[in-house]
Amino acid sequence: MVRSWAREAPVNPLEERNLLSAQAVSRWAGLPIGWVEAVPELSGSCETAGHTLLAMIDSGRAHAEFHYGSRSIARELGAGAIGLFTPGGHADISRWRCAGVRRIMLQFDQRQFDDAVLSEQLARMPLRPEIEFHDDGLAAVLRSMVREVADGCPSGTLFAESLSIGVAMHLQQRAARRYAVGRERGKLSAAQSRRVQELVRARLGHALSIGELAQAAGFSRTQFVRLFKNTFERTPYQYILDTRLQHAHELVLASALPLADIAEAAGFSSQSHMTTAFARAFGATPGELRRAAGI
């Protein structure tokens, strides 16, 4: 059984000023997350207990000095700098000074993922603590997460789960590169792909989770996401969003249904959510598309 990712409060180990409310975080279906305004000065010990913690500077600059046993490490950190702190790790922060720093934090442990393959890979190629690394793709995902939470989670459970599993897979792939292990290239079979596509079409107007899609294909969530992306060259979330957009596009041009009803029929959380997605995908809102078609 997979542990729930639900959380009642933002991740905030140093009790800094929260930029995400507890109410907003309670709607988030992904890994525990926090977005804080960092204190200007800090010193003391940092324990990660039983969790892996990702901490990224979202904006601002900081000077940090850490002590790991006999090692002393000093860093000038700017926006996009990411730290990875692993379970049981202990660091003394001898000095932290910053200006205008906002920090995103994501917390997880591998037992939260129902994937024997991922768990075995992480056991064989454990994540190592890193004081600072830069990864534009990972930074973009972390920022997408906090924007989604701050906006009230309009994209729903599937989006939250997809991003969360994506982070775990990304970290595992970083570890695999360090250990010179190749990336999995397997794909869903034709029958498995068909079952997933049929489920998406049947449930297009309703919320779908990674767990439901994975069950239809007969895989764990993380294994399913890897195989799905190899098969369709898109994440499950992007595939379903594209399918919803195509269905909504057809209804906008072929029916007189109110736009709010089309949004509901296509599985969008609201008309405004559909309008935003429409504009990004087609360069025009549903209303503009209808007017251009003379409807």
Image (cartoon, rainbow, N blue to C red):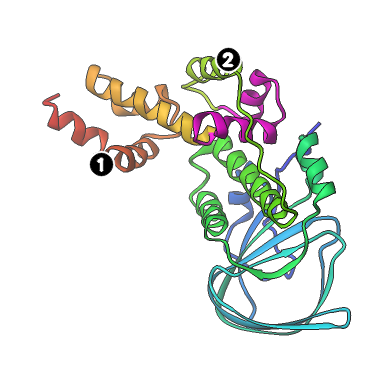
Image coords of residue 53 (percent x, y): 73, 60
Secondary structure state at the residue bearing disc 2: helix
Which badge, 2 or 1, comes first in the chain's sequence? 2
- Local packing at callout 2 (Cα closer than 10 Å; few below 14, some 14-19, many 20+) is some
Which secondary structure type mostly characterizes the magenta part of the structure? helix
Tell me which amino acid carries mark 1. Answer: Gly
Mark identifier at residue 195:
2
Residue 183: name its quadrant. top right
Residue 22: name its quadrant. bottom right
189 on left or right of 110 = left
Which residue does the numbered mark 1 point to in the structure image? Answer: 283
Image coords of residue 263 (percent x, y): 37, 28
- In the rendered view, tell whether residue 254 sits above or below residue 264: above
- Quick check: is 222 in the magenta stretch? yes
Asked whether residue 30 appears in the rendered view, the answer is: no
Q: Nearer the viewer, mark 2 or mark 1?
A: 2
Question: How many numbered discs?
Answer: 2
User: Front-most of 15 and 123?
Assistant: 123
Tell me which amino acid carries mark 2. Answer: Arg
Residue visible at 60% across and 43% down? Answer: 27
193 on left or right of 88 = left
Secondary structure state at the residue bearing disc 1: loop
- In the rendered view, tell whether residue 260 sits above or below residue 123: above
176 on left or right of 148 = right
Image coords of residue 26 (percent x, y): 64, 46
Highlighted range, magenta = 208-235
